[in-house]
Amino acid sequence: MNEKEARINAFTVFIKSSQSVQKLIKQDFLKKEINLNEYAVMELLYHKGDQPIQAIGKKILMGGGSITYVIDKLEKKKFLYRRKCPEDRRVMFACMTDEGRAYMDKRVTEQEALINTIFDEWNDDEVEDAIQLLKRIGMHAESLLK
C-alpha cells in the first residue's frame, strides 16, 4: 500500500472506529433515564456548577430553543431547577438539584466504566500514543479551517 492509500485507509478506519464507539455510547444511553443532550447539560452543571441558561447552548453546541426544551425535560425529572439572577432579571440560571447530583454521581461512574472497557483493548502506552496522535491530527484539521 502506498502512502496515499495508507492515509485514506487510516481515515476510513478512524471514522468507522469513531462511529462504532458512538453507537455503543448511544446504545448505553437508551437504557438510561436521560438522553445525550440532557446528559450534556447535566454534565456541564455537574462539573462547572450553576450556569446561565443562555450560555449553556454555546458551551455544549446546542441551539437556544433546544436548550429550553432540554431544561424543561430535566426540570420535570427533578434533576434541575431555574433560579433568577439577583443582579440581572433577564438572566436565568440552571441549577442542579440534590436528586440530579446523586443521579450524576452514579451516571458518571457508569460512563467512566464503559469508557475504560472500550479502551481495555490498548495498554497504557498505546492510550498515551493515541492521545498524542489524535491531538495532532485534530489540531492540524483545525488549522486547515482557518
Image: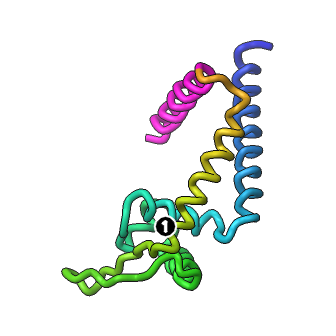
Judge the density around disc 1: few (<14), some (14-19), many (≥20) Cα neighbours within 10 Å.
some
Q: Amino acid at mark 1?
A: Arg
Query: Measured along the vertical axis of the image, is residue 32 above or below residue 134?
Result: below
Mark 1, residue position: 101
Residue 51 in the figure: left or right of residue 145: left
Residue positioned 35% across, 72% down in the render: 52
Quarter placement of the C terminus: top left
Residue 90 position by quadrant: bottom left
Q: Where is residue 67 drawn, in percent x and y?
A: 51, 74
Q: Residue at x 54, y 62 (%)?
A: 104
| Percent x, y of residue 72 | 53, 83
Residue shown at the point (70%, 34%) measured from the top left: 14
Which region of the structure is painted magenta?
125-146
Q: Position of residue 138 (x, y in %)?
A: 53, 35
Q: Vertical placement of 83 versus 98: above or below?
A: below
Residues 7 and 71: in front is: 71
The percent coordinates of residue 24 (x first, y second) are 75, 50
In the image: residue 22, left or right of residue 99: right
Check the image and report above or below for 21 versus 107.
above
